[in-house]
Structures are given as C-alpha cells and as structure tokens.
Amino acid sequence: MEEIILKRAAQGDKEAYAELVRIHYKTVEKFAFQCGVNYSDIQDVTQEVFIKLYRFLHQFHEAKFTTWLYKVTLNTARDYYRKEQREKLKEAKLLQQDWATDVHIDEEDTALHEAILALGEKYRIPIVLYYFHGLKYEEIAEILSISLSTVKVRILRAKEQLKQVLQQGGLSYGR
Amino acid sequence: MDDKQFEARMKKLNNRYDEIPSTLDLDEVMEKLQQRKKRSCQKPLVWLISAASIFIIGVLSAPYLNKKDEHTAQPITEQLEQNEYESELEKINNDPMIVQFKKDYPKLFENLKVQLKEELQLPEEIFLALNSVRSAQALVNFTVDREFHSYISKDFIQSEEQYLRQLFTTPADMLNEPKEVEDWEWIASYSKKINELKVAYNDVVKIDSSIVQAAERQNMYFDANEQKFYYDYEPIKEQLLSIVSPNAFGFFELFKIESYMYGGELADTPENIVHSMLILEQTLKSTSYEQMIDYSVMKNYYELIMMKLFTGSEEYVVKNSDGTYNERFIKIMNQLIESESVTADLATAILHEIETMGQSPTLDKISYSDFWNSVLLQKYPL
C-alpha cells in the first residue's frame, strides 16, 4: 500500500504526499525530539523534514523509505544543532523542561531522558533507534552509514554509560 | 542496575515519548510546499526579466541599432498549454460532485466530532488534543482546500468518509463492528485507541460521574484509591473472544500488567500475577503475533515478572530470616505446576531440591533466559 502512495507522491500527487506525512509524522517528531531538538522547535524541524523529503522524493528508489526518512530527519536535526550553536543557546535548553508540561513524566523518566540527551551523538542515535524505534542493527548501520559491528559496540557502550548515570541517580546527582 | 531493569526503564520512557502531543500542522506543510513550488516556478520568469533588461540596456547603449521589439513573452504554445490546463482544473473543481463533497465532508466531521465528544465526555481541551481528532481535523482542512486534478467517483467519496469515520471509532465501537483485517492488525489498532484514551482520561483534573461512566463504556475503570483510570477487558471477554483468537489475550492482559510493576517491584499479589503470566504464555507460545512490537514488549515483561515470582521482592520474600523457604513462595511454585505453566518443570525441580537438600542450586543460579527457554521448549518441543 505504502509503495503505491510513494509512487504517487513521487509523481507529484499532493494528496498522496499528505497521506505519507500523516503516516510518518509521529516518527519524525519523536526522533527529532530524541536527537535533541527543543520541544518547542519540533514543529519547525518536522516541517522542514517533510519539505526536504518532498523535494527529493524523486531521488528515492529502492531503499526502504523509513531508513531514508530517519536519515533526512537526522540531517535536519544536525542542521538545527548547528544553528542553535551559532545562536549560542545554552545547553540546558536542550534538556527540554517544557515537554514535561504536556506529558505525565516522573523523575525517573526525566533522569533517563536527560542521560540519553547527554550521550555523545555517536552513542545516542544508535540507542534511540534501537530502543525507541525498534530498528534492527542492520537498519541502524544503513542509516548511520557505519558497520554492523560498530552499531553493536556503540549500543553496548551507550547502555553501559546510561546504567552508570542512572545508578548514580541521574545527571543531577551531586550537582 | 541489571539488564532487565534497564530494559523496563527504557520501555517506560518510550511510552512517555509516545504520549508527547503532536505539534505538526499538516495544512501548513502543504501550504509551504505550494509556496516553494510557486517560487521555483517563478525562477524562469526572473531569468527572463534579467535577459530582457540586458537586452534593453544593449538597445539604449547602441543607438545605431534600429528599434526592435522590446517585449519578450512566453512562447505562445506554452501559454496556450498553461491556459488549457488551468481551464481544465477549474472545470474539474467546479464539478457539482466535488463542490458537494467539499461541503458535506466538514459537516460529516462536525457530526462525528459532536457524537464522539458526547460519548467520551472528555473536557473540550483534552478532547481536541486527541490524536484521532487532530488527524481528522487536518484531513478535513486539507480536503476542503485541496485542488482536485481529476473527477471523483462515489467510491472515492465513500472511502474518504469511511477513513474519517475510522478516526472517530472508539474502542467500544470496534467491538461491535465487523472485523475486516487480520487479528494482529485489529489488536494493534484497538491497543492504540485504548492507550490514547487511557492517557486522556488520566489527564482529566475534575473527575465526575459522567466521565467515570463514559470511561467505563470504553472499559476504563476509575480506581478511587490510586486516583487513576485503568483498562480491564474482563467485562468484554466474550465479545473479544468472538473477534480475536484466545491466543491473543496476552495483549489485553499486557495493559493490566503495566500497572503491576512499579519501580521494578510487583504491585499486585503474586497469586494474581501468576494468573496473568499464564495468559501471556498463551500469546508468547503462538507464532501468529511475533511480528508485533508488543510481542517483544510482552516477552520482556514476562521475563521480568517471572524473575520476581521466582526470586521475590520486598513484600514477597522467598527465604525467611532463618534461611528456610517461605510458605508463600512454595505455594506460588505449586500454583505454577498445577496450572501447567511453561515454567512447571523449573518449579518442580526447585521444589524437589528444596525438599531433598533444603537448598535449591537451580534457584540460586536462575536467569531471565531460563523463563524464555521454558516458553520456547513448549513452543518448539524437542
């Protein structure tokens, strides 16, 4: 079914593209947020992702669409960081206090979320894709253009780092 | 922190991520795309103007040149094609069927919205924030504003209306409608609606009897002590049995189990939890649902809770202070054996060791994989 929608969208059918957006926007929003995009900026980043996707849809051929979607989202999120850094926004802003007002989130979840955001990108993205998007090692390797064994090692190290932080009571421990 | 606790924390956080309200405005995306397209269409015109300017400058600075036609225009054939295209589009979009459809669709949306609001009794703000309502609103806005590129049929209208109705279908409605999809697909859709409503009802600050009754119609029950709504499928068990296989009931039980664990501890009696584990085992042993994300979630919960049943918790101790095994633990082991749990052999071995040696080496070195292996042994007997 999605193949037909994709084909129609690539041929310029706006309704088909709108359907594609409806199917995937939650994934993009969630991933963008986990990449460190500020909660209040998710809307802009998600919009940008879908506008980019539309522009490059004709280039999409045999690869799995979702893999490509994650790649575009990751690149858009990276552009966002760069912009953020240029504007010298404080890192604390990325800890996204504001999402807690919309979601019932307890201290445990906040600690884990902060710990994930504090991981270096090379560890954060694989663990996010593996645990929160249910992707296989192979798919993660393809999205990040790294080897399968590198994916495994990074997920393992990310887990170790997270466990260590959580055992110490989160990032705020000892502050 | 062991692996299981870590996995449970990640799963819990994932649920929170899934609850983050969407901020995307589909209409805005489509409008921006339209704007960019227009801008890119204007580019050739900019080039044309630039070229014309150079031409005019050339003419002014070269008086020896004779007066020439200073006007440049689109080739006539292109202009004609463009006019023809626009006139055809206009004709299509003025077609009575399309005009009527654009009038009727928002009316249908409003009617369905009123009915659903009445049915759910959720406060306006929470109701409008429901993903299904937001998606339906975006769909209607898009439909009303869209420019059709071909004529539409009655089948098209029916399918668009059906899609809108599906968005407004409640979990209770799903029980009464004919199932036209595979079990797993139905369960995935039902679970999504249940999760959405569970979050919505738990967001209500002022809970009154009309809300409690409305929630009950969707099988969400209010726990006055905990001050929260929980899902229970017991009252609709028969209906569910007529829709999906009994082997799928582990998914409905999973909703309950999520509230059994609190900070890594059991939040219900071990006796009740054994009953739930037996239902999960049925689903885990089936090969029909392995492709579902919730299947692996269920596997994790199963291993985690089984480990608690075998190794105890603060409230439910396995060993007494004098080193003897607690009577309640022995009872739980016997309950697993009598109810023919997949872990019956494991429980039998442990009880035998305790009886003959006073200690159980099997229990001392038990791991999460022992429980999953027990499932696999029954699923794929040697």
Image (cartoon, coloured by chain):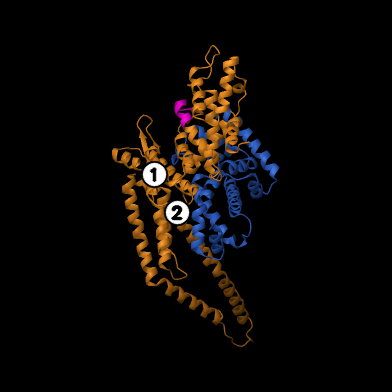
Chain colours: A blue, B orange
Label 1 sits on what residue type?
Answer: Gln
Question: Which residues lie in the magenta part?
Answer: B266-275
Q: Earlier in the sequence, mark 2 or mark 1?
A: 2
Residue A93: percent from the left, percent from the top? 53, 41
Magenta: main secondary structure = helix
Image location of residue B95, percent across then percent down: 39, 72
Q: On the image, numbered disc 2 is attached to which residue?
A: B180
Are discs 2 and 1 located on one and the same chain?
yes
Residue neighbourhood size for the residue with mark 2, other residues' Cα within 10 Å, grouped as few (<14), some (14–19), many (≥20): few
Viewer-side residue, B4 vs B61: B4
Which residue was labeled with disc 1? B239
Pointer 1 chain: B
Q: Is residue B266 above or below residue B292?
A: above
The residue sitting at 52% across, 57% down in the picture is A20
Find out whether residue B269 is within the magenta segment: yes
Q: Mark yes or no: residue B73 visible.
A: no
Work out whether residue A151 can be spotted. Answer: yes
The C terminus of chain B lies in quadrant: top right
Q: CA distance from mark 2 to mark 1?
A: 16 Å
Q: Position of residue A137 (x, y in %)?
A: 64, 44
